[in-house]
Image (spheres, grey):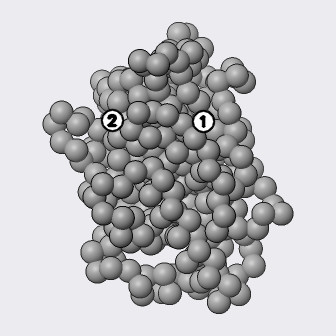
Amino acid sequence: MCRLLAYLGRPILMDKFLYEPKNSMIKQSFSAKEIEEPLNGDGFGVGWYHKEISPDPATFVSIYPAWNNRNLRYLAPKVKSECLVAHVRAASEGDVSEANCHPFHYHNYLMLHNGGVEEFIKIKRRLTSSLHEDRYRWIKGQTDSEHLFAVFLDKLATRGANFDAEDVADSFEEMIIDMKAAMHEAEITDPAYLNMVFVDGERMVGLRYISNPSDKPLTLYYSEGSRYVCEDGMCHMLPATPEEKSVMIVSEKLTEFAEDWKPIPDNHMILVKKDLSVSLRKVTA
C-alpha cells in the first residue's frame, strides 16, 4: 500500500531521507516494517521546490524499483530544498506506469497517497462526471489516488488563490463526503484508506483517515524540530527554536527515536501553516 514522506522547513538534502536513515525510504521500498506488505517495488517518485527559480516543483518518477535506480542514487545527494516529498509504490489500482506514480503534480501543488478504495471502478465515473473540465483533463493515470485528488482540487479551486491550510483541510473533508456518497450508492462496504498529503512549497496538510471508524487507519506520523541530522545512519530531529523549524510527515518512522515521531490520531489531519506552526484537526465528514 505504498510509503510516503513530506518535508517542509530548513533546506535539506534529499539523501537525508532517501538513503541515510536506517529505515530510509529506499529501505522501505523493499522492507517496510509498519504495513502487512513489505515490498513497494512498483515505481517511485520524488518532488522538490526551488522557489527562487520557479513556484512550480520539479518531479522525478520511474516505474523501476527505487532500490535499483542509479539516477536516483546520483540525484539524491545533490538536491537540496526547503520542501520535498518522496513516495514508493505498491500498485493496487492502475498499471505500473509513470502516469500512475506519485507525487501527482498540478500547477504548484504536489500530492501523495498511501491507501486505497476497494472496487474503485464502481465509483470512478460518478466522481469524474462532476469535475471541472480543467481537472478532468489533468488526470493522466488510472489510480483512485489521482481521481480523488482531482475531486479535492475542484473543492480547493472554489477557495480562490489566497487559500490557507484550513481551506486545504476543508477541501479534503468535502472530497471525503463525495467519495462516501459514491461508495454508498455503489454499495461498497469495504473501508477506504486515505493517508494523503498536500504540499505547495509553503504549507503542508496530511490526512489520516479510514471510512469505517471501527477499523484502524494506516500509520501516519509527524515530527517537528529545528534540524534533521544524520550521522552513520543515526538520524534525529533536533529540538526546535522559534526562528528555525522543520516539519515532516511520514507513513513509517525513519528512525528508532520514539520521541521524534508523534502519531497523527485516527481520522485527523495535520495542518502545517506558512509559519510552520502545527495543529491537528478532527475529520468530521
Quarter of image, res 270: top right
- Give the spatial CA distance, label 1 vs label 2: 29 Å
Quadrant position of the C terminus in the picture: bottom right
Q: Is residue 183 visible?
A: yes
What is the three-letter code of the residue carrying label 1? Tyr
Secondary structure beneath disc 1? strand
Q: Name the spot of residue 145 as percent of width and height, x first.
A: 50, 64
At horizontal 53% and vertical 70% (from top left) the residue drawn is: 174
x, y percent for residue 219: 69, 46
Seen from this angle, which residue lies furthest left?
A: 53
124 left or right of 189 in image: left
Q: Position of residue 58 (x, y in %)?
A: 27, 44
Could you tell whether 221 is left or right of 201 in the image?
right
Residue in the picture at 45% in, 67% down: 152
- Please tell me which residue lies in front, 164 or 231: 164
In the image, residue 263 sits, relative to residue 107, either above or below, namely above
Residue at the far top in the pictured view? 231
Name the quadrant containing residue 187: bottom right
Label 1: which residue?
222
- What amino acid is at disc 2? Asn
Residue marked by disc 2? 71
